[in-house]
Image (cartoon, grey):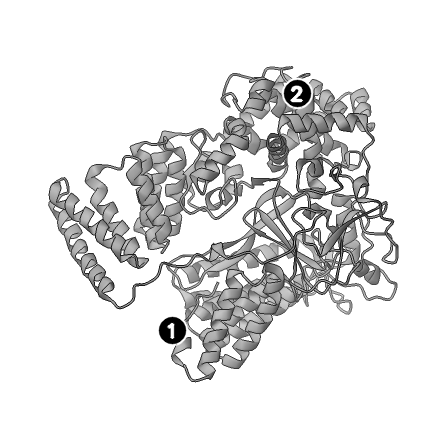
Amino acid sequence: MDLPVEKWKLYISQKLTSLQPSLKEQLCHSMSLRDSFLLSLTLLHPEDEEYLLRLSRYYCVKKDPKMTLSCKEEGNKWFRKKEYRTAAVLYSRALSHAEAGSPEMAVCYANHSAAVFHLGQFEVCLEDIKRAEGGGYPEELLPKLLLRRANCLLSLGRFQGVTEALDSLEEKMSAGQSLEAASHHVLLSKFKQLKLKACKGKSGSVCQPAASDRTQKDLEPWEENSRISCASASVSLNFSACKGRHLVAAKDILPGEILVREEAFVSVLCPGESLLLQGSAEAMLNGQPANEDLHCHHCLKQLLSPVPCQGCSYAKYCSHACAQLAWSTYHSRECSFGGLLLALGVFCHVAFRAVLVAGFAEVSALIKQSHTEEVATEPVAEAPAPSAVAEENSASSIPGCGADGRYSSSYQAIFCLLPHTEKHSLELRLLCSLCVAALCKRLGEAGLEAFISGKSTPEDQGGPKAGKACPEWEVPGEAMLRHMLQLQCNAQAVCALHISGSENGPVTSSKQMRVATALYPVVSLLNHSCEPNTSVTFSSRTAEVRALQSIPRGQDILHCYGPHRCRMGAAERRKQLLSQYFFECWCLPCLEELQPNSGKRASSQDGLSHKPMQQGEEGLLHCSSGACKVRVHEDHFQHQLCDLRLQTEAALELLQCGHPDQSMELLLKCRLDAKRFLSPAHLMVGEIEDSLAQAYVTLGKWQEAAGHLRSSIQTVEAHYGPSSIEAGQELFKLAQVLFNGRAVPEALHTIHEAENILSRHFGPQSTQLQELQEMKACLEEFLGGGRASVASARPKMS
């Protein structure tokens, strides 16, 4: 996903093996980024370009009118099955291939409006209807569309709009006889029913207000830092030889306090795995939603009523404003190279887009400056020992700061992030260099002037033309190579909560999923700890850093780069950090665990249990308990684990298809099997307990569901930590179950625990916090005598 597709990586690996010893020797020596890029241009032969071009055609993103029809028909099949979410995805894909302003696009918008109407997304439905009407929707089908609009307005309580829509509908029905007699009769019957409902609603004493938009909440007030853009006044920027740039508390900081709120300088949506594995045509028809279907390709907001790019079938936006902004800023130069960028991977795409967003003039100036000045370097690492005192320099000397000493969320700050050129493996450096060289050569066919002005050539224009990218492409090529190497240590994985499961069933599931890869100059200032004092969350493309605990004045502001102390032992964590981030971790948790008599903390993923296995062979795993001498061959263990996972997935499918009893029987068997070879702290055990809770919720057995959720919470806390987002999400589910089961005292206690954790990660304005507060208000009213409140508010478990 981040790096190029496997076939291209394997091709470059074989190319490295076949290089002459003299060239390998030259590559092994420390080279400047400029020299690496120029050398890669000479190493990239026409046959290499031709092979990459064939790969990129496999991910072709050109519009295909045949796909419009195929996706629409497939969507209709799912619509008839009442699987409206899947139907909406397929209608969205049909839109992506339709010609802008064509009747086919209007029909696709109308079909999409029908799917989202059944999902209760009435505002989205109205937007779709508006686009269908404005796009030449067939006159004979307009009555159905007008009836759907009236239904939406009625559901939203906009009775004046309902009356106007019905008047327009009545006029259409009386003026034209294009509808068949049977269809006209059905439509007339629905019209009369809807008009009666509208009259009743309009004559009521109080009209229903329009649904409030929780996404438009006022942001929390904060005082922005005068020296660091997008940061709170509670932090300050320091620099030392051992820690590099880092943030420290400028005053005592409270738990949940927001420290950084930064919009990404550049972000690129991660393509769905099915697109990269199957190719675009097969992936289009599978009906499974992927990132490109669920999020705006510019702002990363939830994609409800999609606005497809007019040039390609891949990019989709949440509004015309986002589509126009993306086109003018970068997409006009990316659009025709979509397949190539998918083949080259997200890191190459981010590097390319960073240069486009910055602009050629600024990139050139910084490249020139880097050639003439000695750029300050620093290891992104923790201090060798916690007692070490940082030697601070003046703000004006800190890399990335402007002449005024201010550190901004800017391209200059991005440019000053370390590429660690000499620390990357030879194979990775060659891969990145050849990716950038191949992209520049393809771009070079249009000429540098077209690259700057935004006029690019069609993706399928001719074959590769060697040498076109040299020497005028040295500046953007060097910059792109720099950014691609920076990303291993500085890329942020933007995550969002994805809801899955059948919309018809009583149970849905939620999971944090990676949406995009982005560069955040200010967030990149956070140094690492295996037990951090902050949490980083995302709202669209905006990152928010909050304090997880009280942070005294003068203490470092720390973030976990990935291997948390709850998930693996110190030796394994330090090995992973050294491999990816090029530093040895000396944070306090690592020092504690590395003490001779500390009692090494085992990974909760190791969890083998009581099954006798052969010993003395290579590739054996051992029980995480020091007292247990059980050994098991890794292949056998992985086979058991895979089989257990498949059975659990089958049980969930049974649950979603309306067979809770069969699902529960299979899950109880999975639970028993898991106990035979997994420790209670293994994540698979927690997943089975969570699935059992869902099954009991389906049957309305709240007490039993709560018991299994408590077991799941123990596993999640062991793996992610008791104050983690994952633990907060499980407590949120337990609060919902206890609320529905009217276990009032325990529900109030669980709500308090969930609020305490989730407020530290997401702040007091998050949707989940507001739902918890609503449940708490209902329960408190219930205790005070208003017992009807609990029965009337039963949130769906997610």
* Number of marks in picture: 2
Residue 327 pos. (x, y %): 50, 32
Residue 598 pos. (x, y %): 84, 66
Residue 48 pos. (x, y %): 63, 21
Do we see residue 156 in this rendering?
yes
Locate residue 364 relative to residue 553 in the image: left or right: left
Looking at marks 2 and 1 on the same chain, the residue that comes earlier in the sequence is marked by: 2
Residue 25 pos. (x, y %): 82, 24
Query: 289 or 479, which is in the foreground?
Result: 479
Residue projecting furthest to the bottom = 785
How many residues crowd around disc 1 within 10 Å: few (fewer than 14), some, or many (20 or more)? few
- What's the residue at 50%, 80% (across, down)? 744
Amino acid found under the numbered disc labelled 1: Ser
Quadrant (top left/top right/bottom left/bottom right) for the N terminus: top right
Query: 207 or 758, which is in the foreground?
Result: 207
Locate residue 66 relative to residue 629 in the image: left or right: left
The label number, if any, that marks residue 339 in the structure image: none
- What's the residue at 45%, 75% (across, down)? 778
Do we see residue 83 in this rendering?
no
The label number, if any, that marks residue 792 in the structure image: 1
Say what secondary structure mark 2 lies in. loop
Asked which quadrant contains residue 479, the reply is top right
Query: 385 or 198, which is in the foreground?
Result: 198
Amino acid found under the numbered disc labelled 2: Trp
How many residues crowd around disc 2 within 10 Å: few (fewer than 14), some, or many (20 or more)? many
Locate residue 503 relative to residue 620 in the image: left or right: left
Locate residue 332 relative to residue 28 in the image: left or right: left
Say what secondary structure mark 1 lies in. helix
Asked which quadrant contains residue 508, the reply is bottom left
Q: Which residue is mark 2?
A: 473
Q: Give the spatial CA distance, label 2 vs label 1.
A: 65 Å
- What's the residue at 19%, 57% (across, down)? 195
